[in-house]
Amino acid sequence: MPTETADPRDGSPPPARAEPRTAEGPARRAHEALGLGRVRLFGVDIDPVRLDEAVRWILRAAREPGLCRYVVTPNLDHSLQLRQNQALRNAYADAALVIADGWPVVLASRLFGPPLPARVTGSDVVPAILRGATREEPLRVFLLGAMEGVAARAGRRVEALHAGIEVVGTRSPPFGFEHDARENELILAHIAEARPHVLVVGFGAPKQELWVHAHLPKIAANVALCAGATIDFLAGERSRAPAWVQTVGAEWLHRMMTEPKRLGPRYLKNAIGFPTLLFDEWRERRELRR
């Protein structure tokens, strides 16, 4: 596995692709490939997929050439941000797969209809993809994000646990990297050099979605997954809630108890904003019916 942030000896980035890649391949959008209609909720078109369907599409798309297709995972916090952030709405509109990562989103869909079949989190999707690769058809993966050194530790653990995975690169960019043109070019060049099937991006929302959308023509991966804290989970830096806690929709409580200073204010804000989000959705649907 390559070492983290290993720059070339002369200090210049390795050569990137000369031209953007084109949008080829039958799996450009998941709802088209899977024959599904999207569910419109909170201003976002969400793919009504279960975990196995999402994983099947991603594994297929990972083997196809063309413009990088990316996956976003809206939860309640994202839904509230989308109301105020046009750039984030644009990023969501261009995503190839949009999966509901949050029980409030799923419950709202059941209230308004049509219902989403299940909650599908990025932290469930990525491990399932890793398990889906085989020695005969190994999957090349690049881990981008998390604090310094975490992506490299995650990469070592992934390769130790999954015989079908080749971690071809890891990088944990410094704080504020998104405003540094040279740092972004280095990141893109290292991805191009590694040529992964799957790029796992863990910057947190909305940074990860905005970064992928802004640099999409230069991302030399077949699929990019905007996966939040997944790299931390893969590295063992953080632990997910027990399965039964996830099943009853209380994973947010587990996370808040483990990181109260960071997540407490966010979840309080979300709890306050959720009723307004529901009311606005009801009002918009009522206006459409008139």
Image (cartoon, rainbow, N blue to C red):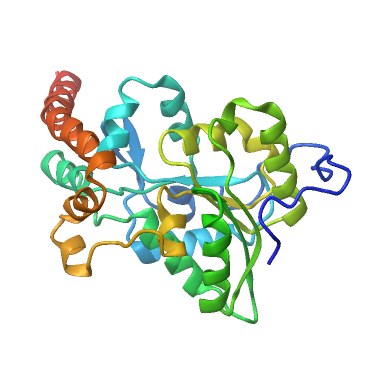
Residue 258: % across, % down: 24, 53
Q: Is residue 132 above or below residue 183?
A: below
**In the visual, does 220 lie left or right of 132?**
right
Q: Is residue 231 visible?
A: yes
Which residue corresponds to the image point at 80% horizontal and 42% vertical from the top-left? 16
Whether residue 34 is visible, yes or no, is no
The residue positioned 57% from the left and 69% from the top of the image is 156
Q: Judge by depth and name the residue closer to the eye, 183 or 57.
A: 183
- 139 vs 55, nearest the viewer: 139
Instruction: Choose between 271 and 87: the one closer to the eye.
Output: 271
**Front one among 96 and 179:** 179
**Quick check: 83 above or below 110?**
above
Quarter-of-image position of residue 182: top right
Q: Quadrant of residue 63?
A: bottom right
As drawn, is 11 to the left or to the right of 214? right
At a point 70% along the width and 38% down the height, the residue shown is: 218
Residue pushed farthest right? 10
**Quadrant that contains the N terminus:** bottom right
In the shown orientation, is residue 216 left or right of residue 20?
Answer: left
Which residue is drawn at the image coordinates 13% and 25% (left, top)? Answer: 276
Q: Position of residue 205 (x, y in %)?
A: 40, 37
Image quadrant in which the C terminus is located: top left
Please give the count of numbered marks on the rendered protein: 0
- In this image, 263 relative to 96: left or right? left
